[in-house]
């Protein structure tokens, strides 16, 4: 455990925890059942710009897919405490046959993907309300989650939902923390130009 700006924090760097949290959801949701050991991969971490392409590489064919977007963040201050304001997201899509699926089957595939999205969102809200260290109670108002339907994805064989959410946690490198500035040779001098 480390102390960050006077607060005790278990994991000050969120990315590894962020990925582990959503991979856990993919492994444990019965519709996803992500399992790398048995080549049943449905979970990937990807940049948001790449999220709508290449649905055939590294995932179980003709099934669900869950793509976790690498988050972005900014630093802000709340009540004198430096915080990381993060924006993350994921995509849940279900395979459909563009040649053989009827209109009703396409609607059913989107509805099935929506159920998985809602299950994961419900878990996120419950975890936030019980103090999970990734969310730090920041999803409790429920207003920081946005869900958007996707059109046909990849080669047109997947349809689903994109979820974008904002959350916050403590910033690990506080300006008043001299350990960081000492490690980099002290404060940066003002007279850098000749």
Image (tube, helix red, strand yellow):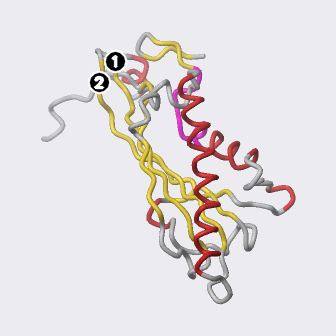
In percent of the image, x 43 and y 18: which residue is there?
179
x, y percentage for residue 67?
59, 58
Q: Is residue 104 above or below residue 84?
A: below
x, y percentage for residue 88?
46, 46
What label sits on residue 77 in the rendered view? 2
- Decide which of 68, 101 is in the foreground and name it: 101
What label sits on residue 95 in the rendered view? none
- Image quadrant where one finds the N terminus: top right
Residue 145's quadrant in the figure? top left
Gap between marks 1 and 2 measured at Cα: 5 Å
In percent of the image, x 53 and y 73: which residue is there?
53
Q: Mark 1–mark 2 contact, CB under 8 Å?
A: yes
- Magenta-span inclusion, residue 11: yes
Q: Secondary structure at mark 1?
A: strand
Residue 43's quadrant in the figure? bottom right
x, y percentage for residue 158?
60, 73
Q: Which residue is mark 1?
A: 81
Counting every numbered tag in the picture gives: 2
Q: In screen coordinates, is 173 left or right of 51?
A: left
- Magenta-span inclusion, residue 110: no
Q: Tag 2: Cα neighbours inside 10 Å, few (<14), some, or many (≥20)?
A: few
Q: Secondary structure at mark 2?
A: strand
- Decide which of 150, 26 is in the foreground and name it: 150
Highlighted range, magenta: 10-18
């Amino acid at each position: 455990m480390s102390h960050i700006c006077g607060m005790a924090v278990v994991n000050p760097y969120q990315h590894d925890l962020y990925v582990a949290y959503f991979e856990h959801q993919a492994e444990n949701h019965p519709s996803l059942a992500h399992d790398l050991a048995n080549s049943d991969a449905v979970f990937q971490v990807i940049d948001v710009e790449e999220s709508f392409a290449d649905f055939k590489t590294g995932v179980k064919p003709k099934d669900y897919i869950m793509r976790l977007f690498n988050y972005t963040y900014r630093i802000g201050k709340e009540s004198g405490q430096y915080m990381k304001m993060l924006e993350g997201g994921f995509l849940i899509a279900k395979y459909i046959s563009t040649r053989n699926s009827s209109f009703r089957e396409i609607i059913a595939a989107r509805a099935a993907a929506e159920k998985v999205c809602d299950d994961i969102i419900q878990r996120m809200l419950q975890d936030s309300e019980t103090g999970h260290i990734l969310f730090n109670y920041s999803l409790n108002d429920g207003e920081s989650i946005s869900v958007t339907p996707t059109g046909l994805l990849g080669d047109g064989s997947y349809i689903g939902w994109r979820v974008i959410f904002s959350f916050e946690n403590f910033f690990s490198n506080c300006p008043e923390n001299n350990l960081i500035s000492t490690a980099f040779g002290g404060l940066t001098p003002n007279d850098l130009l000749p």
